[in-house]
Image: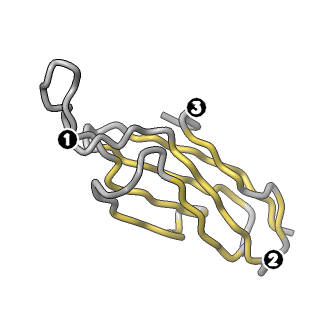
Amino acid sequence: MANSDRVKVRIPAKAKKGEIIEIKTQLSHDMETGQRKDAAGKPIPRRIVNRFTCTWNGEPVVSADWYQAVSSNPFSSFFAVATASGKIKLSWWDETGEVFEYTHDIVVE
């Protein structure tokens, strides 16, 4: 799913070569731990995002494995050095196999 409506990002559209930019992301996701019960007393199945990656023109910027202690609607903030114009791709993997992706074009001058 490209540029999911469940993803919020803040990435600059332009940067100077060598500039350090901040990338902020948030994914709308319940991150159900599997330990809560519904109104009928049945356990709610576990469903968490367990992997996050960011690439810039296919080169890895950051990669993280997440576990059930991560809050719902996980927020990430990290920095990257602007080296070349191209695509920044953010990807989140859910335990059910669902993938949330967001791509952003950036111009490096």
What's the distance in space between the residues labelled 3 and 2, CA to CA?
A: 30 Å
Q: Residue at x 43, y 49 (%)?
A: 92
Residue type at mark 3? Asp
Amino acid at the residue labelled 1: Gly
Q: Earlier in the sequence, mark 3 or mark 2?
A: 3
Residue 50 left/right relative to 104? left
Amino acid type, residue under disc 2 in the picture? Lys
Q: Which residue in the protein does label 3 denote?
A: 5
Query: Quarter-wise, where is residue 66 in the image?
Result: bottom left
Residue 44 spot, x, y in % from top left: 20, 31
Residue 87, by quadrant, is: bottom right
Residue located beneath label 1 in the image = 34
**In the image, residue 77 lies at what x, y percent?**
59, 64
Q: Nearer the viewer, mark 1 or mark 2?
A: 1
When the figure is inspected, residue 56 is found, relative to residue 98, above or below; the finding is below
Check disc 2 and report the residue beneath it. 17
* Residue lying furthest top: 40
Looking at the rendered structure, the secondary structure element under dot 1 is loop
